[in-house]
Image (tube, grey):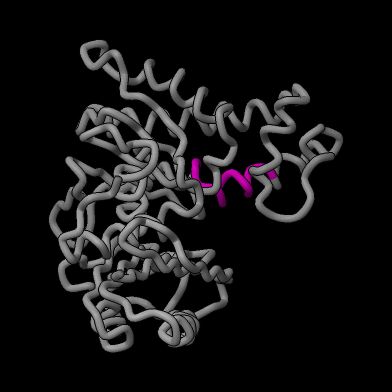
Amino acid sequence: MKYFLGIEIGGTKLQLFVGDETNQVLEEIRMDVTPDRSGEAIRSRVEASIRELQNAYRFSAVGVGFGGPVDWERGQIIQSHQVDGWGGFDLADWLEDLARCPVSVENDANVAALGEALIGSGKNFETVFYITLGSGVGGGLIQEGAIYHGARPGESEVGHLLMDRSGTTLESVASGWAVDARIRETIAQHPDCALAGLVTGDKEARFLVPAVAEKDPIATTILTDTAENIAFGLSHVVHLFHPEILVLGGGLSLCGETLRQEVETRLAAYVMKAFQPLPRVALAQLREDAVPMGALLMARQKLGRNNFE
């Protein structure tokens, strides 16, 4: 039996999954990443985790989904938008020395897209577009089981689509962090609303759906505005690539069917009639495990093992 390691290095979390040739996940390590962490500190945690896992496993290949632009051919990090100390780092070389096996490095949204296309919501479709609505907004396009690549250092950066000529990006209005910030601002102005009464702690967006269920007009407005922005951004994806399915992932997608239905309904207004019926809009089946699971599959692809049934 061969063993594979899938790693997610994101802006808010670090995950390492050990898997085998049957897609069975044998072990999981999960850690939070705080904004004050440096790239060097995160690498120290990765190294310690891998050395611990090597007591039980000998890895045949490693896959990494990194939260930021990467040079996937060289395995080099271009930059992280959340954590300092990653720019120009040769992550693949470093991990190959540590794990003593081949390493593939990709943008985390590309890796999550691969996971959803092969074993998630996009499993039965040839062309799949995945959008991650997390601390940032990213995207990945999968065609016939392979990541679509443009010119280096990246592609499918849907979060950086301009929503207007003033510089507003999709990420600035539809990321989890952007929605959290809008909720904080709104409940400060309307402390008596139902949403304000529900919010406890951070990750405020998770309280939107319960507040909508209580028919809070303020929560409803925030949710529908967010869905409208996501639909508008995805309309450009449809016009450019016309995928068979659009998969919503990342923390904000945990708003679930309420958000999915709003996005699907609003998408029609922005797509030309010739492209209808529209692509299916689905929620990610792998949820917040999409990146490490996709990284495991990418590691298997590295060795030519492409049967993902």
Q: Is residue 172 left or right of residue 167?
A: right
Q: Is residue 40 above or below residue 175?
A: below
Q: Say which residue appears at 56% left-offset and 51% top-offset.
A: 177
Q: Is residue 175 found inside the magenta-colored segment of the image?
A: yes
Q: Say which residue appears at 29% left-offset and 70% top-offset.
A: 2
Specify start and end residues of the magenta stretch as a single range: 173-183
Q: Position of residue 231 (x, y in %)?
A: 41, 28
Q: Is residue 191 left or right of residue 122?
A: right
Query: Quadrant of residue 233 in the image?
Result: top left
Q: Position of residue 267 (x, y in %)?
A: 39, 22
Q: Quadrant of the N terminus?
A: bottom left
**Residue lying furthest top:** 273
Query: Quadrant of residue 222 in the image?
Result: top right
**Residue lying furthest left:** 151
Q: Quadrant of the C terminus?
A: top left
In this rendered view, identify the residue nearer to me: 92 or 293.
Answer: 293
Q: Is residue 288 left or right of residue 93?
A: right
Q: Is residue 48 above or below residue 31?
A: below
Q: Say which residue appears at 48% left-offset and 27% top-offset.
A: 228
Q: Position of residue 255 (x, y in %)?
A: 59, 37
Q: Main secondary structure of the magenta part?
A: helix
Q: Is residue 79 found inside the magenta-colored segment of the image?
A: no
In this rendered view, identify the residue nearer to me: 166 or 294.
Answer: 294
Residue 161 shows up from this direction: no
Residue 102 shows up from this direction: yes
Q: Is residue 117 above or below residue 263?
A: below
Q: Is residue 121 above or below residue 36?
A: above
Q: Say which residue appears at 28% left-offset and 34% top-offset.
A: 237
